[in-house]
Image: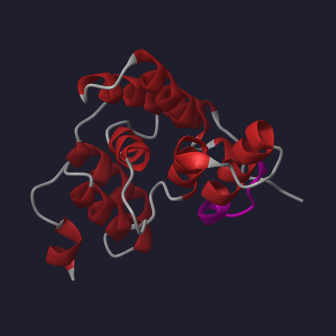
């Protein structure tokens, strides 16, 4: 089986998202413990690429790896564990109930480019558009998510349709 794997650039992206998530958590008034949890979520959000054969399945694999490592593969009990696993599972995807973990993780992911540099959301969206295409599901969803996490004032995806 041929896995996508984690390139050096993606590794830089993962670390950049972890650092940005930590920083955002503190900026939003959370304590050090919560901010460190957000670092761990950021550091694990794309780990599933190492064992993915399709890009779209990496959040599923990342969240399963986190659940297996910390909860023995069982459904985590309580909001803290459940919100952490769901934030990774749903990063870059729509979620039914927005949690602080999902919001921070997606804000961080949309402000760190594919090589790990901190960028504004518009540069990140341009990077995604260049890689996947202006009308791709990946790009349109990224526009939606950027609006939902309040990084853009208008939903760019609806303006492209």
| Residue sitting farthest toward the top | 32
| Residue sitting farthest toward the left | 153
Based on the picture, tell me whether residue 54 belongs to the magenta stretch. yes
Q: Nearer the viewer, residue 80 or 125?
A: 80
Left or right: 19 in relation to 7: left
For the N terminus, the image quarter is: bottom right
Q: Nearer the viewer, residue 37 or 10?
A: 37
Q: Is residue 10 above or below residue 55?
A: above
Q: Residue at x 52, y 28 (%)?
A: 37
Left or right: 36 in relation to 26: right
| Residue sitting farthest toward the bottom | 161
Q: Is residue 4 visible to us here? A: yes
Q: Residue at x 37, y 44 (%)?
A: 100
Describe the colour scheme in one phrase: secondary structure
Q: Which residues are magenta?
A: 50-57
Q: Residue at x 28, y 34 (%)?
A: 119
Q: Is residue 9 visible to us here? A: no
Please state the horizontal and vertical placement of residue 133, each as a whole percent of the image.
37, 68
Left or right: 124 in relation to 93: left
């Amino acid at each position: 089986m041929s896995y996508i794997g984690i390139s050096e650039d993606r590794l830089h992206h993962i670390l950049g998202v972890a650092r940005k998530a930590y920083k955002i958590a503190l900026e939003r008034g959370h304590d050090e413990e919560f901010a460190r949890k957000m670092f761990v979520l950021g550091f694990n959000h794309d780990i599933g690429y190492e064992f993915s054969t399709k890009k779209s399945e990496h959040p599923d694999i990342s969240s399963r790896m986190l659940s297996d490592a910390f909860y023995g593969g069982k459904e985590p009990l309580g909001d803290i564990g459940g919100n952490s696993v769901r934030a990774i599972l749903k990063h870059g995807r729509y979620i039914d109930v927005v949690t602080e973990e999902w919001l921070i993780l997606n804000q961080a992911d949309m402000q760190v480019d594919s090589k790990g540099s901190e960028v504004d959301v518009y540069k990140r969206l341009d990077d995604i558009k260049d890689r996947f295409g202006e009308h791709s599901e990946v790009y349109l969803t990224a526009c939606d998510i950027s609006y939902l996490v309040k990084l853009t004032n208008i939903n760019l995806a609806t303006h492209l349709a």
